[in-house]
Amino acid sequence: MTQKWIVTHDSHKLAKGEFFEGEKLPLWLVGKATPIADQSFEVATPNAEMAKLSAELETALGDVKKLTDDNAALIVERDGLSKQRSELSAELETALGQIAELMKQAKGK
């Protein structure tokens, strides 16, 4: 019958926490693995650790929302500046055309 072991210390082939299945435990795993029953494992997280992680997650989510809002404001500002630049470029082109026209008139006199 196949037995399952959980590795309790790193070995040259398996890391701590990994499982080994076989008829018998090989010599290279002796003293580094514990037999386990056929059942599922549940990871236990202490309530204090869970509360700390939840608080960190809430803080991170708040930071993400703030950064998203800041980014949206920057995009609006960028779009406004881009429009303003386009308007100024058009005014510059008009002014350059007027200067060219005035220079032609000045040369003609």
Image: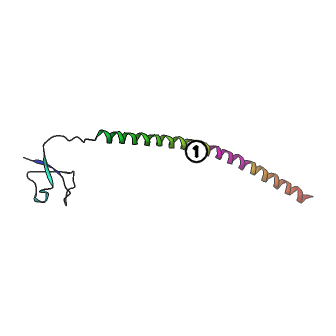
What residue is at 43 percent from the left and 41 percent from the top? 59
Q: Nearer the viewer, residue 46 or 99?
A: 46
The stretch of residues the image draws in magenta is: 78-90
Q: Is residue 9 left or right of residue 45?
A: left
Q: How many marks?
A: 1
Q: Could you tell me residue 88's position as x and y percent? A: 72, 48
Of all residues, the one furthest to the front in this rendering is: 48
- Seen as rendered, the residue at the extreme left is 1
Q: Is residue 2 magenta?
A: no
Q: Residues within 10 Å of mark 1 (few under 14, many from 20)?
A: few
Residue shown at the point (16%, 40%) measured from the top left: 39
The structure residue drawn at horizontal position 71% and vertical position 46%, both measured from the top left corner, is 87
The picture places residue 2, in percent across and down from the top left corner, at 9, 47
The C terminus is located in which quarter? bottom right
The three-letter amino acid code for the residue at tag 1 is Leu
Colour scheme employed for the rendering of this structure: rainbow
User: Quarter-wise, where is residue 72 in the image?
Assistant: top right
Residue 12: give x, y in percent of width and height: 19, 61
Q: Main secondary structure of the magenta part?
A: helix
Identify the residue shown where x is 21% and y is 53%.
16
Residue for badge 1: 74
